[in-house]
Image (tube, rainbow, N blue to C red):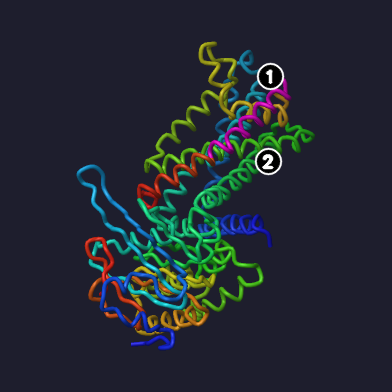
């Protein structure tokens, strides 16, 4: 198990006995804020609430783990947090910025790893993916190439830099997907089942990258299926149960 | 760097990405070039069957048809943007576009750019081949203005393509693109003059941007007479383009917002 710096774990976050302590704002200023988020799926009689009144404040430099069974609403929660989906009611913000208020600034601050193994262009090399994403993520020109090279090194892809995505193994593809989530140096990272296909080396690399994110004051919301062993110490562990967040 | 330069950089990066992917299929261009030659040759011989009283001598009809064919290539490419976006959705790449600072609308414009630019290149190559091999007479003096008309037409067609992307995002279906392409090629006069139509249907050639585009390009490149004065055709094309840009972008925004609220934006 790879632990993150103990100093980053605040006293308030250790006290996870009460449900309210787990989901209410931390004493430090929140970087990520979800307030009163409701989301339903289906229509008419088949309509059900997948997320019910979610309130979550994530302070800078902290890590939250959200677990849940299959279909509990983890991916929906992350999609709402990233602005991909709108909540039925409620508000999501990062640094006080909402996705609809300022799309560009909101999305310059976030990195997102979707669940599964999609989101790569089969015939693009690992380096081409990173160069492309650095531009699409609006990185300053001078930072793009160094950031892409750094991501190749950090995620152990240097030897595979010119290999097409469809010629990478599943684990290597996952490393590339992770590198794409980190390359533009986001301040908040949303990871949906990031352990997918990663071997122990890959996991160690991921922990190193997360550690660097903490070092510059970033935050992580990490979603994983129920029962999955966690590779790091989280400031809070939550579980989605019947659409609500409860301490895990 | 200004915000605009970031958007432009992201769009150019997307064009480069699509160009790299296109070139990675080594025989794709060769296959298209062969198909292009066959099409040009087929119309060359079909034009020999055309009655002179309809559109003039067969060489006139051939030049007339070639301009129609090349602009159809651009139209088809522009209206196929919804298929490109569907592919992005299926591969999970649209989700990545959604979380980019460029945003979904900027992303759709970006993914439309390479196919349209490539179709303009392809159309120019086709025209050059038709001149070089089949000897159609091109008015070189008309080329600069023809490029302006082609750019206006490409933007107008791209906007029609965005309407189909809006339909795709909102309803998960944009199956109308195929019949719109066929309909515009028929009603817009891609292969024959619209004056051959009976009067009751001729109005349809007046209410879309394809007719003034193809009419102007024919006039500028091969000297065919326009249906209306050149200035009127230019104003008409400009007006269609000016109206279609805000309409298509606005509907695209609405479709993105609606499908984000419904939760269907990543579905396909």
In magenta segment, residue B246: yes
Q: Secondary structure at mark 2?
A: helix
User: Residue B99 at x, y = what percent?
Assistant: 47, 59
- In the rendered image, which quarter is residue B225 located in? top right
In magenta segment, residue B42: no
Name of the residue lying farthest toward the right: B141
Q: Nearer the viewer, residue B62 or B160?
A: B160
User: Residue A215 at x, y = what percent?
Assistant: 50, 82
Front of the two marks 2 and 1: 1
Q: Nearer the viewer, residue B79 or B64?
A: B79
- In the rendered image, which quarter is residue B56 located in? top right
Chain letter of mark 1 equals B
Q: Residue at x 55, y 63 (%)?
A: A137
- Disc 2 packing (10 Å; few <14; some 14–19; many ≥20): some
Query: Is the magenta region chiefly helix, strand or loop?
Result: helix
Please say whether residue B22 is visible from this viewpoint.
Answer: no
Q: Magenta segment, which residues?
A: B229-248
Quadrant where the N terminus of chain A sits is bottom left
Residue highlighted by disc 2:
B128
- Disc 1 packing (10 Å; few <14; some 14–19; many ≥20): few
Name of the residue lying farthest toward the top: B199
Report how far apart the C-alphas of labels 2 and 1 lie in the structure. 27 Å
User: Residue A205 at x, y = what percent?
Assistant: 43, 82
Q: Residue at x 40, y 53 (%)?
A: A86
Which mark identifies residue B228? Answer: 1
Q: Residue at x 52, y 49 (%)?
A: B105
Which mark identifies residue B50? Answer: none
Q: Is residue A121 above or below residue B38?
A: below
- Image-based side of A181 in relation to A239, left or right: right
Q: Residue at x 58, y 21 (%)?
A: B206
Quadrant where the C terminus of chain A sits is bottom left
């Amino acid at each position: 198990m790879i632990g993150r710096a103990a100093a980053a774990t605040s006293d308030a976050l250790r006290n996870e006995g009460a449900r309210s302590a787990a989901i209410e704002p931390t004493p430090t200023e929140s970087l990520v804020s979800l307030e009163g988020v409701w989301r339903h799926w289906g229509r008419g009689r088949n309509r059900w609430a997948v997320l019910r009144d979610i309130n979550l404040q994530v302070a800078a430099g902290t890590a939250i783990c959200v677990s849940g069974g299959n279909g509990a609403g983890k991916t929906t929660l992350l999609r709402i947090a990233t602005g991909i989906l709108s909540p039925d009611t409620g508000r999501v913000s990062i640094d006080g910025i909402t996705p609809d208020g300022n799309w560009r600034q909101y999305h310059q601050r976030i990195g997102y790893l979707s669940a599964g193994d999609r989101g790569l262009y089969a015939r693009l090399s690992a380096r081409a993916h990173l160069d492309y994403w650095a531009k699409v993520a609006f990185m300053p020109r001078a930072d793009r190439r160094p950031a892409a090279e750094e991501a190749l090194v950090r995620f152990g892809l240097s030897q595979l830099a010119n290999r097409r995505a469809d010629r990478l193994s599943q684990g290597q593809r996952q490393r590339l997907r992770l590198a794409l989530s980190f390359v533009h140096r986001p301040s908040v990272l949303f990871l949906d089942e990031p352990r997918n296909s990663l071997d122990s080396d890959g996991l160690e690399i991921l922990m190193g990258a997360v550690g660097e994110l903490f070092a510059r004051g970033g935050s992580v919301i990490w979603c994983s299926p129920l029962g999955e062993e966690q590779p790091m110490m989280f400031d809070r562990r939550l579980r989605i149960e019947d659409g609500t967040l409860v301490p895990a | 760097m200004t915000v605009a330069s970031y958007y432009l950089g992201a769009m150019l990066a997307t064009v480069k990405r699509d160009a790299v992917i296109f070139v990675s299929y080594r025989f794709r261009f060769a296959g298209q070039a062969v198909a292009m030659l066959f099409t040009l040759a087929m119309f060359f011989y079909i034009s020999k069957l055309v009655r002179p009283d309809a559109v003039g001598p067969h060489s006139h009809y051939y030049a007339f048809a070639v301009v129609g064919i090349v602009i159809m290539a651009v139209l088809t490419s522009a209206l196929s943007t919804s298929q490109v976006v569907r592919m992005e959705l299926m591969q999970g790449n649209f989700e990545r576009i959604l979380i980019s600072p460029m945003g979904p609308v900027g992303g759709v414009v970006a993914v439309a750019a390479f196919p349209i630019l490539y179709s303009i290149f392809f159309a120019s190559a086709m025209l050059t081949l038709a001149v070089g091999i089949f000897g159609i007479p091109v008015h070189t003096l008309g080329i600069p203005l023809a490029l302006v008309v082609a750019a206006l037409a490409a933007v107008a067609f791209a906007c029609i393509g965005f309407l189909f992307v809006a339909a795709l995002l909102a309803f998960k279906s944009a199956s109308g693109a195929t019949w719109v392409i066929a309909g515009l090629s028929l009603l817009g006069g891609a292969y024959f003059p619209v004056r051959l139509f009976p009067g009751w249907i001729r109005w349809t050639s007046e209410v879309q941007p394809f007719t003034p585009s193809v009419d102007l390009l024919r006039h500028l490149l091969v000297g065919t007479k326009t249906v209306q004065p050149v200035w009127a055709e230019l104003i008409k094309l400009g007006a269609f383009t000016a109206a279609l840009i805000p309409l298509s972008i606005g509907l695209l925004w609405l479709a993105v917002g609606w499908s984000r609220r419904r939760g269907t934006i990543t579905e396909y």
